[in-house]
Image: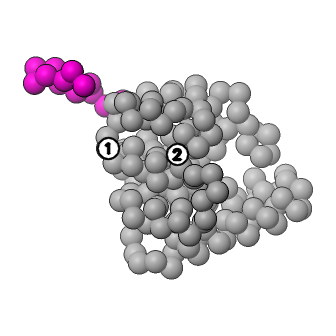
Amino acid sequence: MSHDSRSPDPAPLSLAEVEATARTAHAGQTDKAGRPYAEHLRAVAEGVRQRGGDDEQIAAAWLHDAVEDDALTERWLDEAPLSRRTKDIVLALTKRPGEPPEAYAARILATPGARLVKEADLAHNADPARLAVLDEATRTRLTEKYTRMRALLGRVGGG
């Protein structure tokens, strides 16, 4: 870390730059329905905006799956010119292999701003139009998974 007092930290990435980075990182990826993954990211970012989220949360929405999906590395996130809050939200939403849903939900609830981003993510994942194109077994499994996560996020405290 060769930061001296004369070299200011770089300006944080703009939302347009974050979006472009996320789109590039997820290029070629598709969701379970075969749609370009960037459509999901755009929907979550818009969901955060509609729920009154701020720019830090919208940035996190664009990046919320990047580390989990190996589209970007944790090192990239650590070094990126993003606010600490945005980075913390992305890390909170990054599922660890084998992690119980209860631990995942607890981390989201303990991270300021993360719950709203996860709510927007769940809302898009559970969209009936998205689920309708999946086979019945997958649709049932995912619906149960999203319902359980909503319950875990909803039953502990406010905010």
* Crowding at mark 2 (Cα within 10 Å: few <14, some 14-19, many 20+): many
Task: Specify the quadrant of the image occupied by residue 78.
Answer: top left
Q: Which of disc 2 and disc 1 is earlier in sequence?
A: 2
Residue type for callout 2: His
How many numbered discs? 2
Q: Residue at x 13, y 22 (%)?
A: 4
* Residue 3 painted magenta: yes
> Is 116 located above or below residue 68 in the figure?
below
Furthest residue toward left: 5
Q: Is residue 15 left or right of residue 67?
A: left
> Is 70 located above or below residue 88 in the figure?
above
Residue designated by label 1 = 84
Q: Which mark is residue 64?
A: 2
Q: Secondary structure at mark 1?
A: helix
Image x and y of residue 22, in percent: 54, 32
Magenta part of the chain:
1-15
Q: Residue at x 65, y 27 (%)?
A: 27
Image x and y of residue 71, in percent: 59, 32
